[in-house]
Amino acid sequence: MTTTQTVDDASEDVRSAPASGAPPGGRREHETRDAYLFLAPYLLLFLAFVIAPFAYGLWISLHEYDYSLPEKPWVGLENYTGLIDGTSPYAEAFWDSMKATWIFTALSVPLLLVLPLLVAMVMNEKFRGRNLFRAMYFAPYVLGVAVVAVLWRYLLDSNIGLVNHYLGVLGLPSDTAWLTSQPWAWISLVGVTVWWTLGFNAIIYLAALGEISPDLYEAARMDGANGWQRFIHVTLPGLRPVLLFVTSVTIIASVNMFGQSFLMTQGGPGTETRTAIYQIADTGLTNFNSGDSTAMSMIFSFFLMLVSTLVFFLFRDREPEGSRR
């Protein structure tokens, strides 16, 4: 009895005494200070390159801002209301560019989510030359957008392009205007973008597939699950966190598409492939109207935040019904 009381008293002393001579509150303050010190470099960069430009852009959007003129009068929300109610001379072009942006996003994002997953599942199997195929699929991603766009602009040229040449050799129509007619301009832009960026998503999927325990697949086989059932009930749940990341990054990259349209189709035919970023750059840098262009950027960012919120809502972790109390 005496021994038990002694041990209990000692344990109580250990729990109540500070571990290193310092009070627990002081340790927490020390850890909090260290955390802020480690975060400080990123916070400074975030403040300098995200928050400050955003605040400056918001200020510009409230002015009739032409950087080549000395006077930049305050106009309040006029740039925003003009774009929304259609009274701005740039309103029609802006909303047409928003429509083009969503067309490209709707066409490219499903392909950039599904095709890389199929490629990753094939590359996850064991076969000879697997690493070579992995490198081949990822290689286009290391190229810059200028290289990709100029390369495919030559290949898809309706007069001297190799694509039409080899289609003619095969007896197929060889006079397709890939870059100057619809729907071929959209097909070309989407196809080139998928070819260019497919490898990035495939590599991320491949890394996530390697983290799924083979025991889960073995247990599913023992329960009689076929290949499709294993994909639905084992693979997809295992990829859920990665799917959120890949979907978010792919949507953001697609709505910000600019280089392919600018270099391959110049926004044509007409202005049908002129995306929002293209229109914003043209308004601010070609027409010197930074007030309207930054107002466009704010409206565009607002819609992008809505889409990102929807993606996070769809891929959020749902609590099983049976676990709710």
Image: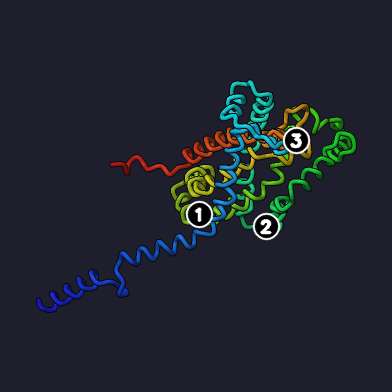
Q: CA distance from mark 3 to mark 1?
A: 51 Å
- Asked which secondary structure carries label 1, the reply is loop
| 253 to the left or right of 243 | right
Q: Residues within 10 Å of mark 3 (few under 14, many from 20)?
A: few
Query: What is the x, y in percent for residue 296?
Result: 62, 33
Q: Earlier in the sequence, mark 3 or mark 1?
A: 1
Query: Mark 3 or mark 1, which is nearer to you?
Result: 3
Query: What is the x, y in percent for residue 241?
Result: 50, 48
Task: Name the image quarter holding the C terminus.
Answer: top left
Residue 276, image quadrant = top right
Task: Name the image quarter holding the N terminus.
Answer: bottom left
Which residue is rendered at x = 78% and y = 43% of the image?
149
Which residue lies under the disc numbered 3? 286
Q: Is 281 rendered above or below residue 46?
A: above
Front residue of 15/158: it is 15
| 148 to the left or right of 310 | right
- Asked which secondary structure carries label 3, the reply is helix
Query: What is the x, y in percent for residue 62?
Result: 59, 33
- Among all residues in the image, which is located at the extreme front? 70
Query: Mark 2 or mark 3, which is nearer to you?
Result: 3
Q: Amino acid at mark 2?
A: Arg
Q: Residues within 10 Å of mark 1 (few under 14, many from 20)?
A: some
Residue 248, image quadrant = top right
Which residue lies under the disc numbered 1? 212
Which residue is rendered at x = 19% and y = 75% of the image?
10
Front residue of 248/234: it is 248
Which residue is rendered at x = 64% and y = 26% of the image?
95
Q: CA distance from mark 2 to mark 3?
A: 48 Å
Which residue lies under the disc numbered 2? 130
